[in-house]
Image (spheres, helix red, strand yellow):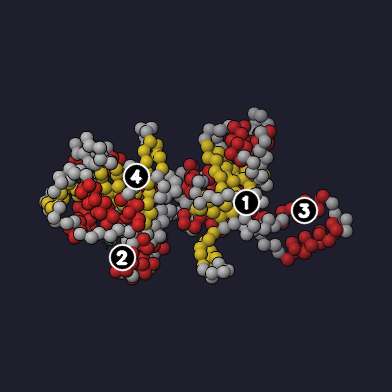
Amino acid sequence: MDIIITEKQGEFIGSPAFETLFGGAAGGGKSYGQLVDALLYALKYEKSKQIIFRRTFPDLERSIIRTSLDMYPREVASYNNSKHVWTFANGSIIDFGYIDNEKDVYQYQSAEYDTIRFDELTHFTEFMYTYMISRCRGANNYPKGIKSSTNPGGVGHTWVKERFIDIGVPGKVHECKMATGETETRLFIPSFVTDNKFLMERDPGYVKRLDALPEKERKALKEGNWDIFDGQYFTEFDRKIHVVEPFEIPKEWDRYRSLDYGLDKLACYWIAISPKGEEYVYKELYESNLIISEAAKRIIEVNGDDKIRYTYGPPDLWNRRNDTGKSAYDIFRENGVILRRSANNRVQGWYSVAEHLKVIDEKDEQTGEVSKIAKLRFFNTCLNIIRTLPSIQHDEKNPNDCAKEPHELTHGPDAIRGFCIERTKATKIKSQEELDYEESIRSRRKEGILGIAGRHTTRSYINYGG
Ligand SMILES: Nc1ncnc2c1ncn2[C@@H]1O[C@H](COP(=O)(O)OP(=O)(O)OP(=O)(O)O)[C@@H](O)[C@H]1O
Ligand SMILES: [Mg+2]
């Protein structure tokens, strides 16, 4: 029997993590990868026990069972049609199972499996998944694991995204804390239809059919985009474009900070601007329960030696508190962090964030190759803004505004809004009147007519080169 696998299927089969998700776009070879992996495991570990789940029996029968009947060699295994189980000559078994309702999990109360597999994981609820994790055990020393495959979307979209996508860079094993306080390892391996040369060769029209889907479905099924849902505010957000590998920022680039402060959360971002005007959010400080003096101390610690032009803060930090007569601004200042007030118009601010996220084509001068880029990008280490910016929704009453609930999602985006609106002001296209005015000031200053006051008047029109 000859089985050739794709590179991504190889990564899935070789995953060293306890929980692995093979996911993303449609047609990437996920279900096939599950079946090859299960077969190899069954052959390698005698008397091993595995189960492959789909949410419903018809789903199971139409897809995974049918493919296994085509693929598995009868010399080493036989299929029992009424029990839905493959039994191998070496005593290994692969069960097929489905969990229609949450209470169905109790059928597996006394079961034990070395490997548990879920195909189309987002069709399951989190309870179904975590309950089945408890069935992954055995008195042998075979490697234990939960291996899943899925597209984005479906009832389980949010918990699957939180469990596998929001934890950090794809393709890397992450140590994650469980509810019990113990840690375990998780790995997300993205796959796209283009990773599956078998399908690309056999059915070249498939990609075109994915392209013809409505935008939301296309983003999920073709691009494997996890950041899509109804009511999403920043639909332009795309991890492949807006999230980048960290790199050393050249010393001469301008750097800014922008923060949102509350006792419940300090969200502070460090943003560097390239000479071309690209904006890189390169550091994130995201901590709870810091009083202002502690918040300032943490900002200074995280800042290190970075030279910062301005630190933007929202206008409410200038409100004086009745008891002390001091504002948050005053206390930040006393503790070494001098803030600059950012404009407070929320809607204008969100438009400005959207403008910075806008995806545009960039042509390489030399090769002529066109690639998609955006002005504002995030280092992949800034986990919370990457999680919250695409999750924030439209406000129900004023669709131009972002929703203030869930409150937890607002801190990072609020801080980034402060930066974007100030930046838009600083780099706005000047009207002829403003240009004439600046020119007149420049010439008058040359003639020694204007001093400091003149410099002040022009400040809001300084172009920082964006
Ligand atoms: N290694 C392989 N060798 C031969 N054919 C393959 C291989 N991997 C995948 N295929 C074929 O490519 C097609 C898509 O694969 P598969 O169904 O596993 O993708 P999927 O990611 O599960 O898709 P979906 O998102 O639709 O569930 C199938 O026809 C499958 O048989
Ligand atoms: Mg599949």
Residue 328: % across, % down: 64, 36
Q: In which quarter of the image is residue 269?
A: top right
Amino acid bearing label 1: Pro
**Disc sitting over residue 457 in the figure:** 3
| Comes first in the chain, label 3 or label 4 | 4
Instruction: State the CA–CA distance, disc 4 to disc 2.
Output: 27 Å
Q: What element carries label 3?
A: helix
Are the two marked residues, 3 and 1, in contact with CB atoms closer than 8 angstroms?
Answer: no
The residue indicated by pointer 2 is 199
Local crowd at mark 3 within 10 Å, few (<14), some, or many (≥20)? few
Q: Name the residue under label 1.
A: 250
Q: Mark 4 points at which residue?
A: 16
Beta carbon at label 2 within 8 Å of ligand 1: yes
Task: Tell me how far mark 1 sits from mark 2, CA to CA.
Answer: 44 Å
Label 4's element?
A: loop
Q: Any atom of ligand 1 within 8 Å of the CB at mark 4? A: no
